[in-house]
Every structure is written in structure tokens, then in C-alpha cells.
Amino acid sequence: MSRTAQTFAPPVMEARRWITGLEFPADRPLINVSQAAPVDPPPPPLLAEMARLVTEVPETHLYGPVLGLGPLREEIAQQWSEAYGGSVAPSQVAITAGCNQAFAAAVSTLCDEGDEVILPVPYYFNHAMWLQMEGVRAVPLQTHAGLLPDADEAAALIGPRTRAIALVTPNNPGGVEYPAALVRAFFDLARARGIALIVDETYRDFDSRAAPVHDLFGEADWDDTLIHLYSFSKTYRLTGHRVGAMLSSPARLAEAEKFLDTVAICAPQLGQHAALWGMRNLTRWKAGERAEILDRRAALEEGIATLDGWDLLGCGAYFAYVQHPFDLPSNTAAERLVTEAGVLMLPGTMFRPEGDASAARELRIAFANVDRAGIATLMDRLRAARLR
């Protein structure tokens, strides 16, 4: 069996097939809350800078350093050191073609076929897909109230082939923001057991907390345990330009360089220059984007509270994760909502291992592209839905 045949079809693409050939009237357009990606282009100042880069900076059209542009690595190191109250050096930063590639690179430096990585469930499906294609076993760690995982329960799952625990905070798909003490507990566990802790913070710029969300970068030799992942896609609307980051030890990044050079050679140069310009010039704009997302989160929480039979399991950043009231499995309910409510969202079956009974009642709502008025309309449609 081929590597790709060992995993499932891309969930977002599968959901898009549900709307193929369908027409939605102008007075009742489709509400698409299936994917966590900005639908708008970068802000005008960044677009202008990108146009300048394309016409005036020849290196944007050439190969660059495999581990990324030096000035971008330096900027990340400086800003991360300040934001987390810790110490990050440019040599501990690599630039990748998106955060998914950062995860793939990290796993490739850690795992051999037959090894294991612990994933809290519900999990980000692309993490599970990559592990399966690598021949690595994804070990599910059940979450509890607030969709929070427990480090003691994770400890019981660690075996001789365990190479890492992977966390996502704010979480995809659950939205929940992991408390600093929880992240610390997982770091201490990973260090004590000689495994890595991968922390994917793709949505860190939309965290509701003002204080540093953890203090791991202040830990001496943090890079012997922590592998931090980040994406510029959401923050600066650079999804199509594929720019992410992986922070770890220089020795691990040297191993990751082999992977990156083989699959992409380097992250796109235009996207890297754009990310650097955004970091230096769009602080106020980014704060406005965060405020808007937090307002939409509040609107979603308020709306779900008005729906009979719906239960909000987690909410934050771009996502709400809910239990639905329908007497149908979630994959059937999600597909039926397209035609009966004009709503496209993803079922819990796409975020849990096959056979996990919890998935049948769960749905993910990616609300970041829907404003307050749109969220009110979404609630009206869900309130009126009668699926049997």
C-alpha cells in the first residue's frame, strides 16, 4: 500500500464536493464556515509593498536560503523573545513553506516508521494525515471539560516508541486556549521522559489573553524539548504565499534543512519578504484584526447560547466546536445542512479517529470570515434546521 493510501482524503476538499453543482439564491447565499483561512487579500499597504518587491527586488524570484531569509529569522527571534519574556536566537528559527510543512519537517526529524506521536483529540486532521503517511502511529489523548488534555493521562500513553506530544493552542479544531500551567505540565513531562513537545501556535495572534501565553522560551535549553510552530497565513492574509516558522535547536534545524531542501528548497521568497514587512509595519493593523476576531468569537458564543439543544464545547481564535442536537451522525448532519440550511461546516468525524463515538455529535464552525450580522444569520439558520 502506498504512503498516501494509508490516510484519508483531505477533509476540506471532501466538504467542498458537497456543494459541487449546487446553486444558492442571492437572497440566501451559502454560509461557508468550513475552512480556517482568510478570504480577503493582504491589507492594501502590504499589497503595495508586495507589488514593489515583485518589480524592484530580483531575489524575490530566486531560490533563497533553505532555512529562510536571515532578516526574517532575526525579526522572529527578537519579537518572540520580547513577547514570551524569553530568549530566542536567529539560529533557533527556520522558515518553512507554511505551518503544515513545519509540522512535517519536525516529525521527519523525530520519527522512524513505527514510532508514535501523542495527539489530543479532537485533533487537527492534517497532523493525523502526515503521521499516517509517514508510517507513524498517532496515539489519541482524550480531552475533557473545555477540550483540555491532561498531562498525567498523556504520561500513561508514553511508550518506548513515543517520540513527541503535539499540542495546538489556540486549538484547531476546538478553539480553546491552553492555560500556561497546562503547557508547562506537558513541557515538564516531555523533558522528563526524553521526548519532544511540539506546540503549534498558528493562531497565537488571536489569543484573547494579554499576558504571555506560556513561559517556555524563558526555560534554560528550551530547545532540547520544545519545537514551536507558527504561521503567517492568518495574521497577514498570506495563505497563498506559504510562510511558516519552526523554532527549535540549531542541531534539529540542521536535520530539518534536509527535509526542506528536498521538498521545497526554500519557502517562497515573496511571502517571506511580505511577512518581514508585515512584522515591522503592521502592528496596529494586526491589533485591529485581533479585536475583530475576538468580537466575532463573542458573537458566536452569544448566538450558540440561544440555540436549544446545542452545546458549545470550545471556542477561540477562528473556531467554535459544538455538539449538535440532531438524531444523525455528524457527517450526515453536516452534509444535510448544506441543502437544508445553506451552511457548510465540518463534522467531528474529520477530527477524531475512526470509531470514536464522540465524533457523531460534534461539528466545527470556522467563524473568522463571518461578521456579526453573518453570525446572526447563521444562528437563525441553525435554529430553523430540522434534520431527522
Image (cartoon, rainbow, N blue to C red):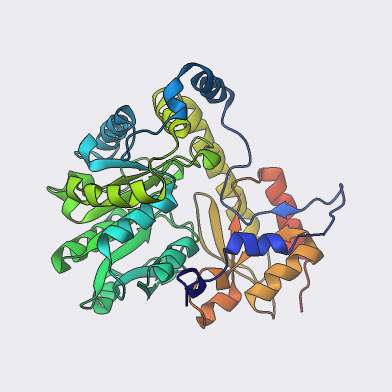
Q: Against 12, is 83 above or below?
A: above
Q: Residue at x 37, y 55 (%)?
A: 103
Q: Against 184, is 52 above or below?
A: above
Expressed as whole percent of the image width and height from the top left, the position of residue 324 reads 64, 71
Expressed as whole percent of the image width and height from the top left, the position of residue 206 reads 46, 43
View extreme (left): residue: 220
For the C terminus, the quadrant is: bottom right
Nearest to the observer: residue 296 or residue 356: 356
Nearest to the observer: residue 235 or residue 90: 90
Q: Residue at x 29, y 53 (%)?
A: 180
Left or right position of 378 against 173 = right
Q: Which residue is drawn at 59% across and 47% down?
A: 368
Left or right position of 5 against 90 = right
Q: Against 101, is 38 above or below?
A: above
Left or right position of 113 against 383 = left
- Quarter of the image where one finds residue 93: top left
Is residue 336 something one can see in this rendering? yes
Q: Residue at x 59, y 42 (%)?
A: 38
Nearest to the observer: residue 72 or residue 198: 72
Left or right position of 273 against 375 = left
Expressed as whole percent of the image width and height from the top left, the position of residue 202 reads 42, 48
- Quarter of the image where one finds residue 359: bottom right
Expressed as whole percent of the image width and height from the top left, the position of residue 387 reads 76, 74
Instruction: Count how many numbered circles sit on residues in the image.
Output: 0
Is residue 305 something one can see in this rendering? no
- Quarter of the image where one finds residue 245: top left
